[in-house]
């Protein structure tokens, strides 16, 4: 069971640029505009933006979009839908809603939209109302539920329905200032402004399924010369930072520079040397700092390559570095997939447990800034200079 919280906002914004406190959807003006046929507001652009917010097309999921105001999303939270045989939310789901409601209140949320995507119940099913009521009760401290919508899939052309709105005794919640259309047809999520903005900002397209994100980390050959491959699986040793760590850190940074220049081939010896470097906790801690530097894209490419090629403790280190990088960028789904790989490679790897627990409890990436400070301190102690930070955490 996975919950993904995507922290919107300052991820990927260079320092010195004008960065919003949270993502302002480029299509918000359409979300809030009456449709012209009777003063009803059309949520279609918001619903089409959901895959762009997540990075993939959700299935059998509840997606909760928390708003700080009518134009500002503070977080997007997705979870697998667990329903009882009669279509009601399972007890574990109710407990989850309580936890996410408290989290939303902590984020300063004033209204939340729920989107149910599930092929087991038709969009018109009256059973969705009970799940929406459970969300509304759990989110009362965060302004309650503003509206709930249901559809069988997040594909273009799929009919959607409004399945819950507040009663007449409550004013409309963010982001809808008034009555909402009862239903419609989903436009192409890949053509939504949110998806296009995502593609420009991160270079990532919307994936068809969450499994495609996991597939980006499937195992591959250890090195680029498999005929003479001689993989080593180093084990960590407890030691104080030393000159060998300094050399190892400098060598890893040189490979990251090579990746940035487009030189991405790795021999067997080079891959083994990287594994040796990553099993040092001091080298790994220093490399966490790359998540906020201009080398972040090339570091991401290298960590992903190594997470697919290494084994044991070294693989766990590479996958944890990758997950941390995604976490700091507010990409919770990608982070959780990387943490799964790290845990599979080494179930006792401590840092992945710390980060994955923080992610599962919705801790903001900015709360992990202490790890960045540690990274720079370790690098300085080793006499190696990391590039200056140019990104802020999401």
Image (cartoon, helix red, strand yellow):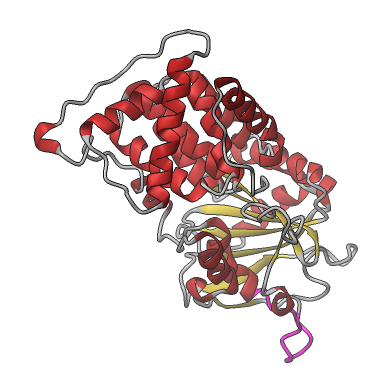
Location of residue 209 with respect to 360 vertically, above or below: below
Q: Nearer the viewer, residue 271 or 52?
A: 271
In magenta segment, residue 41: yes
What residue appears at the point 48 percent right and 22 percent down from the top-left corner?
A: 246
Location of residue 245 with respect to 36 vertically, above or below: above
Location of residue 182 with respect to 305 vertically, above or below: below
Say whether residue 89 is visible: no
Residue ranking furthest to the bottom: 37
Q: Position of residue 185 (x, y in %)?
A: 54, 78
Q: Please give left or right for residue 372 compared with residue 40 in the image.
A: left
Q: Main secondary structure of the magenta part?
A: loop
What residue appears at the point 31 percent right and 26 percent down from the top-left corner?
A: 273
Q: Please give left or right for residue 149 compared with residue 248 in the image.
A: right
Q: Position of residue 193 (x, y in %)?
A: 59, 74
Q: Quadrant of residue 132?
A: bottom right
Which range of residues does the magenta coloring cover?
33-44
Say whether residue 152 is visible: yes
What residue appears at the point 60 percent right and 20 percent down from the top-left corner?
A: 381
Q: Position of residue 181 (x, y in %)?
A: 69, 78
In magenta segment, residue 260: no
């Amino acid at each position: 069971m996975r919950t993904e919280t995507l922290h919107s906002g300052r991820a990927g914004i260079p320092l010195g640029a004008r960065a919003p406190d949270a993502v302002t959807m480029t299509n918000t003006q359409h979300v809030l505009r009456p449709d012209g046929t009777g003063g009803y507001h059309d949520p279609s652009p918001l619903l089409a933006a959901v895959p762009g917010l997540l990075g993939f097309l959700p299935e059998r999921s509840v997606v909760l979009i928390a708003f700080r105001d009518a134009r500002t999303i503070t977080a997007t939270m997705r979870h697998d839908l667990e329903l009882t045989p009669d279509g009601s939310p399972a007890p574990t789901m109710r407990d989850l809603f309580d936890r996410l409601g408290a989290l939303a209140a902590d984020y300063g949320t004033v209204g939340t939209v729920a989107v149910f995507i599930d092929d087991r119940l038709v969009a018109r099913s009256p059973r969705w109302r009970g799940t929406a009521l459970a969300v509304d009760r759990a989110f009362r401290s965060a302004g309650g539920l503003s509206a709930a919508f249901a559809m069988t899939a997040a594909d273009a052309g799929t009919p959607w329905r409004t399945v819950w709105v507040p009663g007449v005794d409550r004013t409309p919640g963010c982001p809808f200032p008034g009555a909402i259309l009862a239903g419609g047809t989903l436009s192409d999520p890949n053509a939504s402004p949110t998806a296009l903005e995502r593609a420009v900002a991160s270079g990532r397209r919307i994936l068809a399924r969450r499994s495609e994100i996991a597939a980006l980390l499937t195992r591959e050959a250890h090195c680029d010369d498999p005929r003479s491959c001689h993989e080593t699986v180093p084990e960590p040793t407890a030691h104080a930072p030393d000159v060998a760590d300094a050399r190892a850190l400098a060598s890893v940074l040189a490979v990251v520079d090579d990746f940035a220049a487009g030189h991405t081939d790795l021999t067997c010896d080079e891959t083994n040397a990287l594994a040796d470097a990553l099993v040092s906790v001091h080298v790994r801690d220093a490399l966490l700092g790359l998540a906020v530097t201009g080398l972040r894209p090339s570091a991401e490419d290298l960590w992903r390559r190594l997470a697919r090629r290494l084994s044991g403790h070294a693989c766990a280190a590479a996958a944890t570095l990758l997950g941390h990088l995604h976490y700091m960028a507010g990409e919770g789904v990608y982070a959780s997939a990387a943490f799964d790989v790290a845990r599979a490679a080494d179930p006792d790897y401590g840092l992945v447990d710390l980060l994955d627990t923080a992610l599962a409890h919705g801790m903001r990436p900015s709360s992990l800034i202490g790890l960045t400070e540690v990274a720079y301190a370790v690098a300085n102690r080793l006499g190696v200079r990391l590039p200056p930070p140019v990104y802020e955490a999401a």
